[in-house]
Structure formats: structure tokens, C-alpha cells
């Protein structure tokens, strides 16, 4: 993480598909759900997500952006 202090605001999601990645994502999901329920001042919170795990981009400048497929991790968290 390049920005000091951002680590407390950004929750990592690992898309590698390994056992370690799954374990990290379980912890991340738990932290995200706790924040949604409690927030910073105990009043609930909000989070922003990139549901496909990336930002939409285009193959060429000013071309139509390509939107990544939503990952199951994001969809399951939204449902909860």
C-alpha cells in the first residue's frame, strides 16, 4: 500500500484461487460485514466495491469500456 493510513480503509481481496487467498478473503469479508454493521462510530457503515475486482477499462483510448464479470465474493457480501 503506497498511501500511509490507507491500510485501515482498504480491505484486500485476493483473486488467486489458492487456499491462502480463500483464507484471506474470509477475513476480509468478516471485516467488511463488521464495518457495515458497526461502522466507525457504531452507527453502521458503507463500503465501495469494484465488483469484478478491477476497474473497467477499454482496449483503446475513448473506446467502449469492458466491464469485468462480478466475482462471487462481492455478490455474497452484498446479499448478507
Image (tube, grey):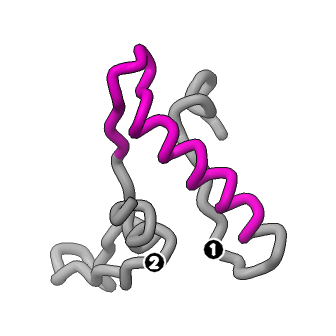
Question: Which quarter of the picture shows residue 22?
Answer: bottom right
Q: Main secondary structure of the magenta part?
A: helix
Q: Kindly indicate the quadrant of the structure image that contains residue 44.
A: top left
Residue nearer the viewer, 72 or 61? 72
Identify which residue is drawn at 47% across, 78% down. Answer: 72
Work out which quarter of the rendered image holds the C terminus and state it.
bottom left
Q: Is residue 26 magenta?
A: yes
Q: Pointer 1 and pointer 2: residues touching (CB < 8 Å)?
A: yes
Is 66 situated left or right of 19 in this image? left
Q: Residue 28 placed where, x, y %? A: 62, 51
Q: Is residue 80 above or below residue 18?
A: above
In the image, residue 27 sits, relative to residue 68, either above or below, namely above
Q: Secondary structure at mark 2?
A: loop
Instruction: Give the percent coordinates (x, y) of residue 61.
Output: 24, 74
Q: Secondary structure at mark 1?
A: loop
Tag 1 residue: 15
- Badge 2 crowding class, 10 Å Cα cut-off, few under 14, some 14 to 19, many 20 or more, is few
Q: Position of residue 38 (x, y in %)?
A: 43, 28
Circle 2 residue: 71
CA gap, disc 1 and disc 2:
9 Å
Specify the farthest residue to the right: 20
Residues in magenta, as a range = 22-47
> Residue at 16% across / 82% down in the picture?
64
Looking at the picture, how far across and down is residue 21, in whole percent? 75, 69
Q: Nearer the viewer, residue 20 or 55?
A: 20
Q: Residue at x 52, y 32 (%)?
A: 9
Q: Would residue 72 be found to the left or right of residue 60 on screen?
A: right
In the image, what residue occupies the spot 38% across and 68% down?
51
* Chain-order first, disc 1 or disc 2: 1
> Where is residue 18, by image quadrant?
bottom right
In the visual, does 79 lie left or right of 1?
A: left
Amino acid at each position: 500500500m503506497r498511501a500511509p493510513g490507507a491500510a485501515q480503509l482498504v480491505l484486500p481481496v485476493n483473486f488467486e484461487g489458492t487456499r491462502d487467498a480463500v483464507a484471506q478473503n474470509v477475513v476480509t469479508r468478516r471485516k467488511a460485514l463488521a464495518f457495515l454493521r458497526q461502522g466507525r462510530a457504531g452507527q453502521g457503515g458503507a463500503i465501495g466495491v469494484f465488483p469484478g475486482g478491477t476497474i473497467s477499462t477499454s482496449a483503446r483510448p475513448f473506446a467502449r469500456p469492458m466491464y469485468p464479470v462480478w466475482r462471487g465474493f462481492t455478490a455474497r457480501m452484498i446479499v448478507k
